[in-house]
Image (spheres, helix red, strand yellow):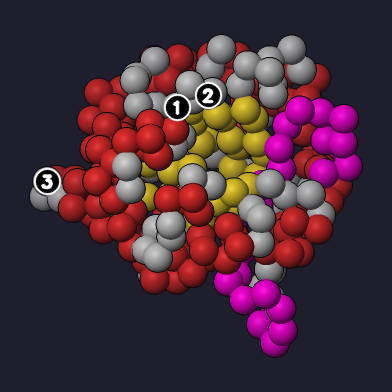
Amino acid sequence: MRKPFVAGNWKMNTNSHSSVELVNGIVSGSSEVAGEKVHVAVIPPFVYLQCVAKALSTASIALGAQDIYYEQKGAFTGEISASMLKDIGCTYVLCGHSERRHVIGETDELVNKKVTAAIAGGLLPILCVGELIEERKASKTEEVVTRQIKKGLAGLSAEKASAVTIAYEPVWAIGTGLTATPQQAQETQALIRKLLGEIYDSELAGETRILYGGSAKANNAAELMGQEDVDGLLVGGASLQADDFVAIIQAAV
Ligand code: PEP
């Protein structure tokens, strides 16, 4: 059975004080359900990972990073490796978030190298996929998501791929206030699960967690997570207020 999973991507927000205040609020508000009934992760900016890790030391909430570089070490100014993230207590790492694909210009090939390096380094990647509005209007959602998943998981055995969580995040719904309807999320996420069955097998497809992301909030979280193939939520804006994020965590139970 897939336990629900709610992850908060803080993007380029918070500071050294507010990151700790935020995580403390999340820890105290979710202590009865986090870990036990729902997996929870917070994904702060790199520079606040350590202070958030310290605040999480006795909590059942995992830490994640927003990005990773695929090399292990060396002359890669500004980049962060899997072993560095592991060293400071990260469990998860986002790979191929739409803002990295469409603002920074990451390709499917680069995302695949990051997913592969994350797994090799003992991290659990959250592979983000999703179509642009023009792709949805042109009925290309399935084509785009299929390509992103096939290329993102290229070269990974079923054993390695079992470390991956998929996040379906339609780009037109991220940070826009436009949420995919529960039916739209379910339709695409069922396609993703079917695709995983074709690439690997039904066991892996049945066990892989597939999250929805895109303007998820306390007032739509339960309905989204009520869909058969929506195993949880990747939350951006609504993860920046402890009360809002805690309400989303509670909606998963
Ligand atoms: C995200 O950044 O992954 C996201 C889903 O953002 P928001 O919830 O703000 O749309």
Q: Residues within 10 Å of mark 1 (few under 14, many from 20)?
A: many
Q: Where is residue 153 shown, x and y percent of the image? A: 39, 58
Residue bearing mark 2? 4
Q: Does label 3 or label 1 sit earlier along the sequence?
A: 3
Residue bearing mark 1? 231
Q: What segment is highlighted magenta in the picture?
A: 53-77
Q: Does label 2 or label 1 sit earlier along the sequence?
A: 2
- Foreground mark, 3 or 1, reads 1
Name the residue: 63% across, 16% down: 37
Is the residue indicated by label 2 positioned so its CB lies within 8 Å of ligand 1? no
Give amino acid for label 3: Ser
Name the residue: 67% across, 75% down: 72
Q: Does label 3 or label 2 sit earlier along the sequence?
A: 2
Instruction: Determine the secondary structure under disc 3.
Output: loop
Give amino acid for label 2: Pro
43 with respect to 220 (left or right): right
Instruction: Determine the secondary structure under disc 2.
Output: loop
Instruction: Look at the image and say whether residue 61 sits in the magenta stretch.
Output: yes
Name the residue: 49% across, 50% down: 159
Task: Give the quarter of the figure containing the C terminus.
Answer: top right
Identify the residue at the far bottom of this view: 75
In this rendering, does residue 124 appear at all? yes
Q: Residue 139 shows which numbered tag?
A: 3
Q: Where is residue 41 shown, x and y percent of the image? A: 65, 36
Above or below residue 79? Residue 94 is above
Give the CA distance from mark 2 to mark 1. 5 Å
Q: Where is residue 199 shown, x and y percent of the image? A: 29, 50
In this rendering, does residue 44 appear at all? no
Instruction: Look at the image and say whether residue 85 sits in the magenta stretch.
Output: no
